[in-house]
Each structure stands twice: as C-alpha cells, then as structure tokens.
Amino acid sequence: MYDRYGGPEVLSLAEVPVPSPGPKQVLVQVHATSVNLSDWETLRGTPLYSRIGGLRAPGRPVLGSDIAGRVEAVGSEVTLFAPGEEVYGDNLTLKGGFAEYAVAPESALARKPASLSFAEASTLPQAGAIALQGTAGITAGMSVLINGAGGGSGAFAIQLAKSAGAHVTGVDNAAKLAFMRTLGADEVIDYRAEDFTRTGPYDRVLDLVAHRSIFAYRRSVARGGRYRCVGGTTRALLRMTTVGVVAGMVTGRGLGVLAVKEGPAHFTPLAELCVAGRIAIHTDRSFTLDETAAALAHVGAGRALGKVVVEIR
Ligand SMILES: NC(=O)c1ccc[n+]([C@@H]2O[C@H](COP(=O)([O-])OP(=O)(O)OC[C@H]3O[C@@H](n4cnc5c(N)ncnc54)[C@H](OP(=O)(O)O)[C@@H]3O)[C@@H](O)[C@H]2O)c1
C-alpha cells in the first residue's frame, strides 16, 4: 500500500479487509499480477497523467492492474463468471492487484486459457493490448521501428510485427540488444549510442517511451508512413496530440498518440497466439508479494527483459 507518491520506499505491506464486489464486480483471489511501466509511473506520480486518479495523493492505495486468479465471489448482476473460475484481465481503473484479493469490473476480465499459468496470463492484458493495437495494420515488407522494444509491451510487439512479415528494428538500452534479437528483431539500436530518428525513415514507428520533438519524430517516418506513441513524457504526448497531428498531415505522414483500448477483446487475441505457440511470453523475473517494491523498482530501472511478475499464491 502507499498513501503518497514516491519511490519504492513509500510502499508497505499491510493487512486490510478483503474487498467486497459491487453488483457488476468480481472478487478475484489473486494468484499473479504482472508489473507494467504504468504501475511504476502511478507509484511515482510522474509523468503527470499518471495522477489522473489523484492529483496530490494516490487515488488507489494498492497498485497492480494486470491480475490473474480465481473468482472468489461475484456481484448480484454478474452474468459472465462464477466462483471457482480462472480469470485474468487489466484492472486499470480499480487496480489493487498487488494483494491477495482484488475487486475488478466483470467487463475487464476474461476466462484464463487452461494451458497458460496464472503468471503467464498476468503478463498479457495491458502489454498485449498495447502491442496488438500498436502493430495493427503492419504488413509484409514494411520497415517497422519499435522504441522501448525490450520491455513488456515491446517484447510482444517485436514478435507481432515479425510474424506480419515486417523488417523490424528494436530500440532500447545496450543490455537489451541481444534479447531483442532473440525476439526476432532484424536490427537493434542502443538509444544511448544512436539516434533512431536519423537511421530511418521507417514505414511504421511505435514509440513506447516518447520524449523527443515533433520534428525528430517526423524525420523518423517515411512519407505515407505512420508514427504512434503510447507512452512517454507528458510534454511529448501533448505536443504530439496537437502540433504533431497537424505537422504530420501537412507533410504526408500520420503522427499521433495511440489511445489504447482496454478490455478482453483487446488482449485475448494475443493469448490465443500464445496458446497456439506462435508468440512467446518472456518473463524476466518473478517476485513474491512482500517483494513488490523490488519488482516495481526492477521495471522502473529498465532492467527487465520482457515482463516481471509478482506471484501471490
Ligand atoms: N496510451 C495508453 O492508453 C497507455 C495505456 C497503458 C500504458 N501506456 C504506456 O505504454 C508504455 C508501455 O511500456 P511497457 O510496460 O512496455 O514498459 P517497460 O516494460 O518498462 O519497457 C519500456 C522500455 O523502454 C526503455 N526506454 C526507456 N527510455 C528509453 C528511450 N529514451 N529510448 C528507448 N528506450 C527507452 C526502457 O529501458 P531503460 O529505462 O533502461 O532505458 C524499457 O526497456 C508506458 O509508457 C505506459 O505508460 C499507455
């Protein structure tokens, strides 16, 4: 739990009552919760958009969006799930996943495929929705660059772009270059050594960590191509939604922010590909519940190759 924005040291372990589900909510006995960069951002309260739930203090005392577990109880209007069923989903609005029990809207959950473990399933909802929507429309022969490609969403995005037949360039820190190659990246760039906005232009750019100027991003995309960012500094995202869109239009490029749609329809297609063995799940490390602060710090420091999971049960 935490009651003020800050580093991992503001988190503490506490005993609290088991939450009760509302009419359209499900009480989940959590088995595993994966860590997303959005958890780290909401812990620290930066970028500013991570404070949407609470400007001065955290709106939710327990973090953790991507849960997988067993249904313990259901609200009076729940029709899709029954106690005992195995579910997973991105509980981004209510959070509370770094705990033994969490309440989630019925609409956020899907039935867990039997062949995926709870830990595996927990890696998919948020990163999968970002990766699927970020790589939609990529076709064979396109040159695709993914910035921040060695983390949770990027590890899926590289594989999806490769399976669509694209020539894929992954950008991340030096420690992740070999990992991105194992995922299928044709080219890799260490962002501290080389500027990807000068190595293209590319047909598609998916940026998970935008922080540069509109002009740099415009330069990275070929005419008729498309740049989309899903995360980054507030300043970069604001500039992209305003000046970027116009700058793109007048120069024949599609520049913009991808507002990622949530919900089972947006991540279950990735689970199907994982079950079929066509996309692999890469978990860098698993932590226990009382190591949640260390798990968040591991992701925040950019050390994780792929996903990080907190195994609760
Ligand atoms: N648009 C939406 O609706 C929506 C919804 C949910 C989440 N999001 C966003 O989506 C993003 C998803 O990230 P994720 O969970 O995949 O994060 P992640 O696992 O932490 O991966 C991000 C990777 O980017 C690297 N990186 C950091 N700075 C970089 C730079 N300047 N150039 C290149 N690489 C850099 C990081 O390593 P180092 O730090 O070591 O460099 C890390 O490997 C987050 O920004 C999140 O806020 C958006």
Image (tube, rainbow, N blue to C red):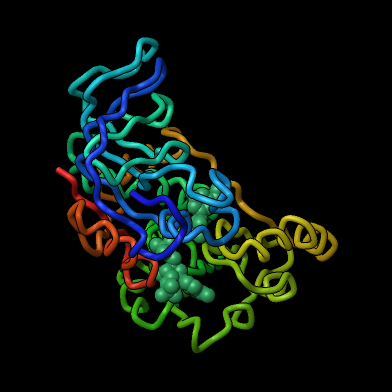
Q: Residue at x 26, y 37 (%)?
A: 16
With 21 as the anchor, is 5 left or right in this view?
Answer: right
Q: Residue at x 21, y 19 (%)?
A: 83
Front in this rendered view, residue 20 or 86: 20
Can residue 157 be seen here?
Answer: no
Front in this rendered view, residue 160 or 78: 78
In the displayed image of the protein, which residue is found farthest to the top?
A: 76
The quadrant holding residue 73 is top left
Q: Residue at x 31, y 67 (%)?
A: 298
Residue 115 place in picture, x, y as percent: 18, 39
Residue 5 place in picture, x, y as percent: 46, 58
Residue 8 place in picture, x, y as percent: 35, 63
Q: Residue at x 63, y 78 (%)?
A: 197
Tell me: residue 67, above or below residue 246. above
Front in this rendered view, residue 140 or 89: 89
The quadrant holding residue 276 is top left
With 43 as the anchor, is 201 left or right in this view?
Answer: right
Residue 257 place in picture, x, y as percent: 65, 54
Viewport quadrant of the C terminus: top left
In the displayed image of the protein, which residue is found farthest to the bottom?
A: 193
Tell me: residue 10, above or below residue 122. below
In the displayed image of the protein, which residue is found farthest to the left?
A: 313
